[in-house]
Image: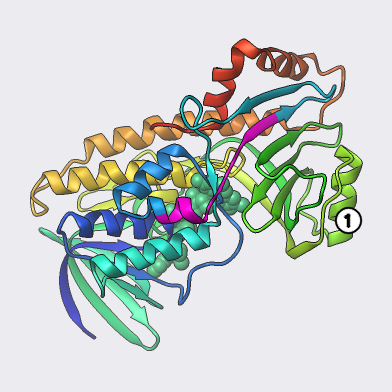
Amino acid sequence: MSERTVDVAIVGGGGNGILLACLLADRGLTVRVLERRATIADRPRAFGIHPAALDALDAVGVGDAVRAEALALTDGAFVGIDGRRAAVTFDPRDFPGPVVLGQNRVEELLEQRLHALAPRALQRGVTVTAVTEEGSCVRVSARIGGDTLELSAAIALLVDGTNGRLSETFAGPARLVGPKRWYAMAEAEATTEDQAGSVALIASPGGVVESFPLPGGRRRWVAWRDNDAALDDDQFRMLVHDRTGCSVGIIHGPVSVFAAQSRRRRRLVHGRVVIAGDAATTVSPIGGQGLTIGWGAAQTLADELTRASIHDRIVFRRYSRAVSRVARRAQRRASFFMRLGDPTSPRDWLRRGAVLVLARRAMRRVVYRLVVVRRL
Ligand SMILES: Cc1cc2nc3c(=O)[nH]c(=O)nc-3n(C[C@H](O)[C@H](O)[C@H](O)COP(=O)(O)OP(=O)(O)OC[C@H]3O[C@@H](n4cnc5c(N)ncnc54)[C@H](O)[C@@H]3O)c2cc1C
């Protein structure tokens, strides 16, 4: 057992935990990130990095490295059941678009940056078992293999993800928000039909199919499902083709099926313990804004932590308000897109009407603001 003292202990070294650590180390605080996993998670998750998220990456000096490797999106469209398109073309001056890079690569770049700022801040292979407030500090107990670790910190940040057990212990289960839907997802080689920087959400009687470009000549395909049954490559290809007429290239990795739903926690501050990232608020991946929201909120949290003396009692009012404001907006947007993507028919006047209105040229700015988070 070893006992150490730091300003801020961070439980969870995912995308939000590492970015928070970079922000705080850059401001001169001593941080320790305790992460259960031995390596960065490699399952496909976030890939769309919105302008607001790039601002957060710039704040820790990683933005340019991400831009250098990422693919810039050129345009995005929602295609209604009658073929009508509500589209937006991205341009850096008026309508800057998201860039695309896999979450695992972005986390790798953040981890390298943290290593440069605070070489021993990240400890992998450590499972935190308890976080207890004791007077003016927080005691963090953890397991590393057969050993235990005790850490004392002025503040503990719980960034343990959407199913984080410690966040649940502190704050109870998160409230489910908006619709729940199932989707199948696969990454495949792009075909000659695919347009390199274009995103398309295509409505159909069988449910929406989404197609996103990835760096390295690949595409991610996401298709609405009415259950969580597994699909093999051929079944997935057939499903996309039947709904859209599009051909999916050679699939790499397994076809995954996942449930999407937003969640929100009312109380994020519990004395010296603060909940952040997906543990605080989860935005359904349909809308793809989870990390953007988490990183925006992380900047407010880091500002509040560095403006006050870390040993005072900090209320984190600005942070709590910021999370609530941006999460509500992002979750409303995600719910809108999930409902827009349900199975539809030519007689579904409400959704046809929505696409009809959004397809008008005068609505370009509205479509842009629906799909891109420029500022938080
Ligand atoms: C399919 C999919 C697509 C997505 N697409 C996008 C997108 O395009 N754009 C976007 O912005 N967002 C997207 N998201 C959302 C994004 O992936 C999440 O918002 C982001 O991963 C949340 O990061 P986090 O650090 O809060 O949580 P996580 O990444 O879940 O990290 C939590 C970490 O805490 C660790 N941990 C948990 N408990 C303990 C413990 N007791 N001790 C030590 N460590 C612990 C875990 O091992 C984990 O590494 C997508 C999500 C999914 C599922």
Asked if residue 362 is positioned above or below residue 310 in the image, the reply reads above
- Which x, y percent locates residue 100? 56, 48
Q: Is residue 355 left or right of residue 63?
A: right
Can I make out residue 172 in this image?
Answer: no
Task: Identify the magenta region.
Answer: 65-77
Helix, strand or loop at label 1? It is: helix
Residue beneath the point at 44% across and 65% down: 108
User: Is 165 colored magenta in this rendering?
Assistant: no
Asked if residue 125 is positioned above or below residue 49 in the image, the reply reads below
Can I make out residue 371 in this image?
Answer: yes
Which image quarter is the C terminus in?
top left
Residue beneath the point at 67% across and 25% down: 87
User: Is 76 colored magenta in this rendering?
Assistant: yes
Task: For label 1, count other residues whose C-alpha is less than 10 Å away and answer few (under 14), some (14-19) or many (20+).
Answer: few
- Which x, y percent locates residue 90? 57, 31
Give the residue type that dot 1 points to: Gln
On the image, numbered disc 1 is attached to which residue?
A: 235
- Which x, y percent locates residue 127? 39, 74
- Which x, y percent locates residue 180? 65, 40
Asked if residue 231 is positioned above or below residue 225 in the image, the reply reads below
Front residue of this view, candidates 166 and 330: 330
Front residue of this view, candidates 294 and 359: 359
Q: Which quarter of the figure has residue 296?
A: top left
Residue beneath the point at 41% across and 63% down: 109
